[in-house]
Amino acid sequence: MNLIYEKCGDYLIPNLIPDPEPEGELRKFGLMRKSYLENHRRGIYSGLLLSGRLKEHLLMIQEQAETRFDLLVEQMAVQEGMTEQLKAQDQMLWIRRMNNIRARAEEIVLKEIVYCL
């Protein structure tokens, strides 16, 4: 191994450079997963953090959760008859129902993906 050392007083300290983190921005589900691991699964969180794979894990969970959320919202909207015609006729009813669908889909995603191991 070829290590570079930095002199600090009388000691030589190795300059350890971590692997670059994957590109991507953490959004809602990724941040919720991070908070969950930090507060309830401290060992897993520390292991991922120390191995340098935390952000990779969070981005993977985030992608899975967002895909599942979109699929659930689409399926529930079709099942409950949420059409553009309803949106044109009664916007407030359409908004209430869509908000309800989105809340249920988010609850399912949180339970199935974000808050499980």
Image: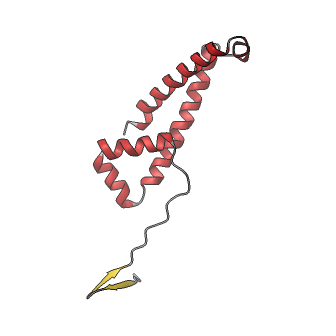
* Left or right, residue 9 beside residue 68: left
**Quadrant containing the N terminus in the rendered view:** bottom left
Residue 71: x percent and y percent?
59, 29
Please tell me which residue lies in front, 43 or 26: 26
Examine the rendered structure and indicate whether residue 51 appears above or below residue 68: below
Examine the rendered structure and indicate whether residue 108 appears above or below residue 11: above
The residue at the far top in this view is 89
Residue 9: x percent and y percent?
28, 86
Examine the rendered structure and indicate whether residue 81 appears above or below residue 37: above
Residue 111: x percent and y percent?
41, 30
* Left or right, residue 5 beside residue 106: left
Residue 72: x percent and y percent?
56, 26
Residue name at image x 64 percent, y 13 percent: 81
Residue name at image x 60 percent, y 15 percent: 79
**Quadrant containing the C terminus in the rendered view:** top left
Figure disc tally:
0
Colour option used: secondary structure
The residue at the far bottom in this view is 10
Residue name at image x 54 percent, y 25 percent: 102
Residue name at image x 61 percent, y 19 percent: 95
Which quarter of the figure has residue 11? bottom left
The residue at the far front in this view is 92
* Left or right, residue 52 beside residue 8: right
The residue at the far left in this view is 10
* Left or right, residue 110 beside residue 90: left
